[in-house]
Image (tube, grey):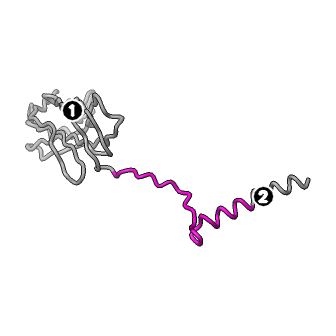
Amino acid sequence: MDVDRTVVWGVVGLVVVTTLVSGPLVGAVDLTSDAETPAYGVGSVTVESASLPERATLTAGRFGAGEYRLQVPDAAVAIAAVEGRPLLVYKLEIDERGYSRSTTHFLSTENVGSYAASMSDDTFAPDTVNQTAYDGRLALVVRANDSGRVVAERSITVEVIE
């Protein structure tokens, strides 16, 4: 029994000593991990090429759903290198509608190679869609170190499908 009691008091003593030595009162030992992880938007990315789609679609809902769904195909990006945690922004603007949408992609070294930048779908009320097509503008922008750089940009047609 004395051995069990000695082990228990030994563990309690170790916990108390560790708490005192690493606590705010003494602070002699820092037991926390201080990994220097850069913030999002800090670093760099090397884009070898980027391909943007030629068109997007606004498709009328089926069976009386009444909404138009905006779908933008993925952009194909060839990423050669990533350092830190830069951002890749995939953006669509339709000036005639006063519409702008973007999706931010958080990059890391795991994204080196072929990368598909996607944009989530959106919906429009049927009474707001009054043309057969709209002119749009797509862009891929790299954001890092408080600056932005356009890596690809093109005019597209947003086709309305009834």
Magenta stretch, residue numbers: 13-39
The reply, left or right, for residue 113 in relation to residue 91 is: right
The local crowd at label 2, few if under 14, some if 14 to 19, many if 20 or more residues have their Cα within 10 Å, is few
Q: What secondary structure prevails in the magenta region?
A: loop
The local crowd at label 1, few if under 14, some if 14 to 19, many if 20 or more residues have their Cα within 10 Å, is many
Say which label, 2 or 1, has the lower sequence index.
2
Q: Quadrant of residue 2?
A: bottom right
Residue type, mark 2 in image: Gly
SS at mark 1 in the image: loop
Magenta highlight on residue 101: no
Magenta highlight on residue 19: yes
The reply, left or right, for residue 75 in relation to residue 20 is: left
Rendered-image quadrant of the C terminus:
top left
Residue occupying image coordinates x 27% and y 36%:
81
In depth, the one of 159 and 79 nearer the eye is: 79
In depth, the one of 75 and 151 nearer the eye is: 151
Residue that lies at the very extreme toward the front in this rendered image: 28
Residue 63 position in % (x across, y down): 27, 27
Residue type, mark 1 in image: Val
Residue 13 position in % (x across, y down): 74, 62
The reply, left or right, for residue 12 in relation to residue 112 is: right
Residue occupying image coordinates x 75% and y 60%:
12
Residue that lies at the very extreme toward the right in this rendered image: 1
Mark number, residue 10: 2
In depth, the one of 127 and 77 nearer the eye is: 77
Residue 73 position in % (x across, y down): 22, 29
Q: Quadrant of residue 99?
A: top left
Residue 83 position in % (x across, y down): 30, 42
